[in-house]
Image (cartoon, rainbow, N blue to C red):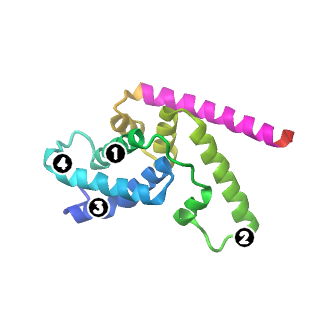
């Protein structure tokens, strides 16, 4: 349990990362904030039971992932939010408007494509490519063997490329 000495340090160190992960999953800022709060409440309440068999980061991602799964089961009919809701995360005010628009359109295409993949593929792509977790950390968060993580990630990337390519072909066909 290095790099933090109090619950506030733990929260400061990991909150934005956990929030970004949950935001990519639920696509709604307020819901992601609620789930992040729930994650940290569960973590703080369960801190005494943390055995240190995994890193604190992995443990928090596991709690966040389980919070997302519980929310998803309750809210099966959540609505899609436009890429406009993502702009507060990494908006660059100095960027050329044409470059910004092109980047925004591309981000929207990428996220739309990810959301078309099956749920397991979405999990591994977001955890690996956006949250930059290691295979070991993803394995612990999802409760999978490392071989399943690697295989699923490989298949997810293949499916992602195929889906994105098909969408681009369809767009240029019109």
Looking at the rendered image, the disc whose residue lies closer to the viewer, 3 or 4, is 4
Determine whether 124 is above or below 23 in the image: above
Element at badge 4? helix
Element at badge 2? loop
| Magenta stretch, residue numbers | 148-171
Percent coordinates x, y for residue 117 in the rendering: 57, 35
Q: Residue at x 58, y 67 (%)?
A: 91
Q: Are marks 3 and 4 in contact (CB under 8 Å)?
A: no
Q: Is residue 153 magenta?
A: yes
Density class for disc 2 (Cα within 10 Å; few <14, some 14-19, many ≥20) is few
Residue 150 falls left or right of residue 71: right
Q: Is residue 127 magenta?
A: no
Percent coordinates x, y for residue 19 in the rendering: 41, 56
Q: Main secondary structure of the magenta part?
A: helix
In this view of the protein, can residue 103 be seen by the observer? Answer: yes
Residue 109 falls left or right of residue 42: right
Q: Would you name the residue on which mark 4 appears?
A: 46
Residue 14 falls left or right of residue 101: left
Density class for disc 1 (Cα within 10 Å; few <14, some 14-19, many ≥20) is some
Tag count in the figure?
Answer: 4
Element at badge 1? helix
Mark number displayed over residue 96: 2
User: Nearer the N terminus, badge 4 or badge 1?
Assistant: 4
Mark number displayed over residue 11: 3
């Amino acid at each position: 349990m290095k790099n933090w000495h109090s619950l506030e340090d733990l929260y400061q160190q990991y909150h934005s990362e956990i929030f970004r992960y949950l935001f990519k999953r639920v696509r709604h800022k307020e819901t992601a904030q609620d789930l992040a709060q729930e994650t940290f409440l569960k973590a703080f309440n369960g801190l005494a039971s943390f055995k240190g068999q995994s890193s604190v980061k992995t443990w928090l991602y596991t709690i966040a992932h389980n919070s997302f799964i519980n929310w998803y089961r309750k809210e099966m009919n959540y609505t899609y939010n436009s890429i406009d809701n993502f702009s507060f995360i990494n908006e660059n005010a100095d960027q050329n408007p044409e470059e910004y628009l092109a980047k925004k359109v591309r981000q929207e295409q990428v996220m739309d494509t990810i959301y078309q993949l099956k749920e397991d593929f979405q999990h591994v792509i977001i955890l690996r490519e956006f949250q930059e977790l290691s295979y070991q950390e993803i394995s612990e968060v999802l409760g999978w063997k490392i071989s399943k993580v690697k295989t699923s990630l490989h298949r997810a990337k293949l499916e992602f490329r195929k889906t994105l390519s098909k969408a681009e072909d369809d767009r240029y066909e019109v």
